Image (cartoon, rainbow, N blue to C red):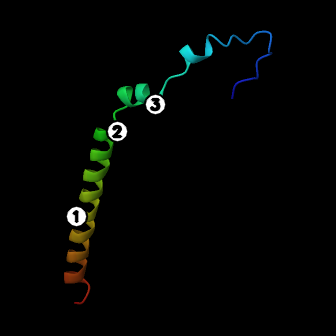
Amino acid sequence: MHAPTLPSTYDPSAAPSQRSTAADFLLTHPLLPILRSVFFSSLLWVFLALALYGVYSLIAPH
């Protein structure tokens, strides 16, 4: 957490250059590969759960 600056030391011309825009953030942190990996990971967890349930349903009734 940053300490508040005094009005006498605040330079309004420097503030816009220090802030990054949403477009800059998306260029440096692409969302598509992250969302794709989360989706494929979720699919793998679903397949693992279905496989374990299938094995359990074969073993448990006996």
* Near-viewer residue (18 or 37): 18
| Rendered view: 45 above or below 30 | below
Name the residue located 80 percent from the left edge and 15 percent from the top edge: 6
Q: State which quarter of the image contains the N terminus.
A: top right
Q: Quadrant of residue 53?
A: bottom left
Residue topped by disc 3:
22
Mark identifier at residue 47: 1
Element assignment for label 3: helix
Taking the image as shown, residue 26 lies to the left or right of residue 57, namely: right
Please give the residue where the numbered disc 2 appears in the rendered image.
31
Place of residue 18 in the rendered image (x, y in percent of width and height, measured from the top left): 56, 16
Mark 1 lies on a secondary structure that is helix
Residue 37, how many percent across, how many down? 28, 45
Say if mark 1 contacts mark 3, CB within 8 Å: no
Neighbours of disc 1 within 10 Å: few (<14), some (14-19), many (20+): few
Pick whichever, 32 or 39, lies toward us: 32
CA gap between label 1 and label 3 equals: 36 Å
Q: Nearer the viewer, mark 1 or mark 2?
A: 2
Is residue 1 rendered to the left or right of residue 17?
right
Q: CA distance from mark 1 to mark 2?
A: 24 Å
Question: The residue under label 2 is which amino acid type?
Answer: Leu
Pointer 1 with pointer 2, Cβ within 8 A: no
